[in-house]
Image: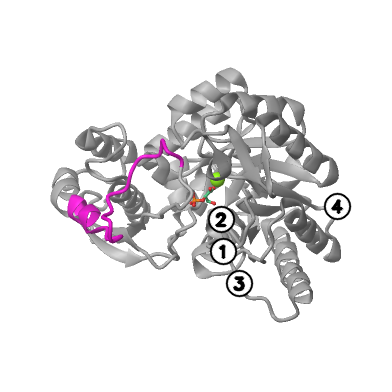
Amino acid sequence: MMSDLSIFDLKGFEIIDSRGNFTVRAKVKLGCGVTATGDAPAGASKGSREVVELRDERGSVEMAVKSINYYISPALIGMDSKFQTTVDKVLINLDGTENKSRLGANAMVATSIAVSKAASLALGVETFMHLGGSGPHIIPVPLMNILNGGLHAGNNLKIQEFMIIPVGFDTLKEALSASLVIYKALKSLVTEKYGKIYTAVGDEGGISPPLSKTEDALELVHSAVKRSGYEDKVLLGLDAAASNFYNKKEDKYEIDGNSKTRQEMIDFYVSLKDRYPLLYVEDPFEENDFKSFTELQSKMKGVLVSGDDIYTTNVKYLTKGIESGATKAVIVKVNQIGTITEAMEFVNLAKRHSIKTAISHRSGETEDSFIADLAVAVNSEFIKTGAPARGERTSKYNRLLEIEKEFGFEYMGKKLA
Ligand SMILES: O=C(O)[C@@H](CO)OP(=O)(O)O
Ligand SMILES: [Mg+2]
């Protein structure tokens, strides 16, 4: 006999995230007694079109907790947890706003995730199977941010993320073991440069040396790859998060001590690509400049220009990007849009247009490994989940290692090189 999968109880409460802020956790209990939790992550460099969290000036998310306890819970109790789309649609309708400001996207995301995990447990299947059916068959490639700048670090680097992309391996296990060597080589290089054991890291666990020039940071990461002997197997990526250094008044980008026009920015990225093995460049321009994304993508054929703040996991903006050929890749963050169902619709739209997807963490994270399951569920080519250190990042890598070991899915690396 099938166990009782109806939602019996749902509660919200506050927990602490990796940046030392409160965030919201939802805990759901099903009729069969199974319980599961879901956590809302939090971004620092956010797109202006993202849906909004309920959070007060002091940083408290009590309002989101109340939203779960007093509004969401009564609406979901009694519903069948295995119908994720139906549950998410109830959340969307109950909220009724464009930017999820009534229920709060943090309350909605935590609930959506908790329900998907509880249903999987009660059904006796992995969360990626519950969400992906019989389709999942690959393990995503990490876009691994090992050197932090921008809003995530205390240095003067304007580019937010310097990533290694371990493509030339047959398994995630091999890819991660090379990445660990490179991460340590980078630490040694920085320590050699600054003369003592260098421990400063940014929000995503990447080293954050006191640099101010893009090229110096790229050179350091590239040296770490070379010193480790993986030059032919590991490519590089950037997340510029360019809205953060765009000067709207002047219509210029303030970077590396210069004010650059959009044309100069295009030349800058092209020159970096000529000197470094770049595969991936995220948010190279501010979030409204679709035209420059398109121009850069057409100039850098072998590079995946990717959209994060420009799309905010919203099909409306991706549709615009598809029309103009703005990017060959997209970032997917459930909390930019509010529910798992909407994030999966976004992924499906990208896939229909052969656009590669990167399921992504936020800079403020918890130990919830849900995004690893989501990435496998939708056969995402990439996952972005930070440095291979610190529990809130490693929980996702470790979940992927577990899935690879148990199910033997194919690692995507060599297909993306
Ligand atoms: O810009 C990004 O891609 C993200 C995650 O790396 O940062 P944040 O969560 O601060 O928006
Ligand atoms: Mg980004």
Relative side of 181 to 393, left or right: right
Q: Earlier in the sequence, mark 1 or mark 2?
A: 1
Q: Earlier in the sequence, mark 3 or mark 1?
A: 1
Between 391 and 243, the one lying in front of the other is 243
Between 125 and 20, the one lying in front of the other is 20
- The residue indicated by pointer 3 is 200
Residue stretch rendered in magenta on the structure? 47-68
- Residue 154 visible in this rendered orientation of the protein: yes
From the viewer's perspective, is the residue at label 1 or at label 4 nearer? 1
- The residue indicated by pointer 1 is 154
Is 67 inside the magenta-drawn segment?
yes
Q: Is the residue marked 3 within 8 Å of ligand 1, measured from its CB?
A: no
Crowd rating for badge 3 (residues with CA inside 10 Å; few <14, some 14–19, many 20+)? some
- From this viewpoint, which residue is outermost toward the top? 323
- The residue indicated by pointer 4 is 232
Q: Are marks 3 and 1 in contact (CB under 8 Å)?
A: yes
